[in-house]
Amino acid sequence: MYEYIKGMLVYVGPHYVVVENGGIGYQLQVANPFRFSGSLKKEITFYVYQAVREDAITLFGFKDYTEKQLYLKLISVSGIGPKSGLSILASDDHLGLIQAIESDNVSYLTKFPGVGKKTASQIILDLKGKIGDLLPDTYWMENNMESGTGYGPTAILEEAIEALSGLGYSDREVKKIVPVLEKEDFKTTEEVLRMAFKLLLKG
């Protein structure tokens, strides 16, 4: 079992990142890959969770130990699989997520892809009172984001839309917010995704 991987970040795409260590490129499924764009071609450490199934072995990467622990708590809930767990973490509003669980806010949780009222209620039932210790370490999300891609606004928007689709958001949900996104002057895919998540979670 892996605890973490430290190496050169050589690729950032809509669905995963690649970290090279010892001549081997490790493909990591991460929540919102583009938040790591600023670390491209730099050494970076990902905490890792390995999921083994009959047809696949998948590595999931996390920015720090706290994010990994929150992910493990989420996938322990019946109805939340590895991909759903990443989709929930992709908005980076981990503080809001924890507060929603602690305050029985079902409507907030159902805004995530694949989370209906039944699953949202199960998340609250299973995790309420068990994740409060993660709160103090979640404030890095808002202030420790690195980004930077450097190409045109159309390509940036298209890349963000592809990332949202990969996270499980429907075409209808995405098309609803595209007109709002097109009015903004974004410099990076990460900026597009930040606003997109706010709009999607706002409903």
Image (cartoon, helix red, strand yellow):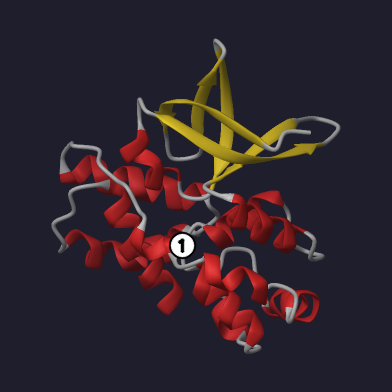
Residue 125 vertical position relative to residue 30 in the rendered view, above or below:
below
Q: Is 65 positioned to the left or the right of 53 in the image?
A: left
Q: Quadrant of the N terminus?
A: top right
Q: Quadrant of residue 10?
A: top left
Which residue does the image show at 13% across and 57% down from the upper left? 185
The residue depicted at 45 percent of the width and 43 percent of the height is 33
Q: Amino acid at mark 1?
A: Ser
Q: Position of residue 20 (x, y in %)?
A: 51, 20
Residue hosting label 1: 91
Q: Is residue 184 left or right of residue 196?
A: left
Residue nearest the observer in this picture, 12 or 1: 1
> Is the C terminus in the top left, top right, bottom left or bottom right quadrant?
bottom left
Q: Is 80 situated above or below 7?
A: below
Residue appearing at x 75%, y 75% in the figure: 130
Residue at horizontal 58 percent and vertical 24 percent from the top? 26
Is disc 1 placed on a helix, strand or loop? loop
Regarding residue 119, the answer to whether it shows in the image is yes
x then y, percent, for residue 39: 36, 36
Q: Is residue 177 left or right of residue 202?
A: left
As drawn, 123 above or below 39:
below
- Frontmost residue, 51 versus 6: 6
Q: Is residue 49 left or right of residue 76?
A: left
Q: Can you say whether 131 is above or below 8 in the image?
A: below
Residue 194's spot in the image, x, y percent? 34, 61
